[in-house]
Image (tube, helix red, strand yellow):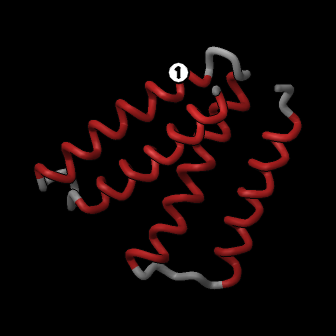
Amino acid sequence: MAWIHLMIAGLLEVVWAFAMKQSEGLTRPGPVAVTVVAMLASVWFLSLAMRSLPLGTAYVIWTGIGAVGAFVLGIVALGESADPLRLTAAGLILAGLLLLKFATPH
């Protein structure tokens, strides 16, 4: 269950990052509210995952899901650059996350 909690926490990190971008510098109340709620929920799910996962594993995977997810959402939804060097960098982050997941005892 810890890995499911961690995935939810990471996906919520993507939600709050996107909402923060949409808030235009925290000036739009709707996106600001989504940002705050998603942040709180993300940290709560992270805390649930940390009940049984090692700190380093949980934290790195949480931030990695958020980073790669926000990167992909930026390309897909906001038209950000998808040049080969950026894609390679994101791929390396993803590879590191997978290695860390498989290196962590269940």
Please determine whether, in this image, residue 33 is positioned above or below residue 68: above
| Residue that appears at 30% across and 53% down | 20
| Residue that appears at 64% across and 26% down | 2
17 and 2: which one is in front?
2
Q: Quadrant of the N terminus?
A: top right
The secondary element bearing badge 1 is classed as helix
Please determine whether, in this image, residue 14 is positioned above or below residue 81: above
Q: Position of residue 61 (x, y in %)?
A: 66, 41
Amino acid marked by disc 1: Ser
Q: Is 65 situated left or right of 15 in this image?
A: right
- Residue that protrudes farthest toward the top in the picture: 51
54 and 81: which one is in front?
54
Q: Is 71 situated left or right of 79 in this image?
A: right
- Around disc 1, counting alpha carbons within 10 Å, would you say few (fewer than 14), some (14 to 19), or many (20 or more)? some
Q: Quadrant of the C terminus?
A: top right
| Residue that appears at 21% across and 57% down | 23
Residue 102, by quadrant, is: top right
Please determine whether, in this image, residue 95 is positioned above or below residue 82: above
Q: Position of residue 14 (x, y in %)?
A: 45, 52
Residue 56, by quadrant, is: top right
Q: Position of residue 29 (x, y in %)?
A: 11, 49
27 and 101: which one is in front?
101
Q: Is 24 situated left or right of 20 in this image?
A: left
Please determine whether, in this image, residue 44 is positioned above or below residue 73: above
| Residue that appears at 51% across and 40% down | 8
Residue at the spot of label 1:
47
Q: Position of residue 7 (x, y in %)?
A: 58, 41
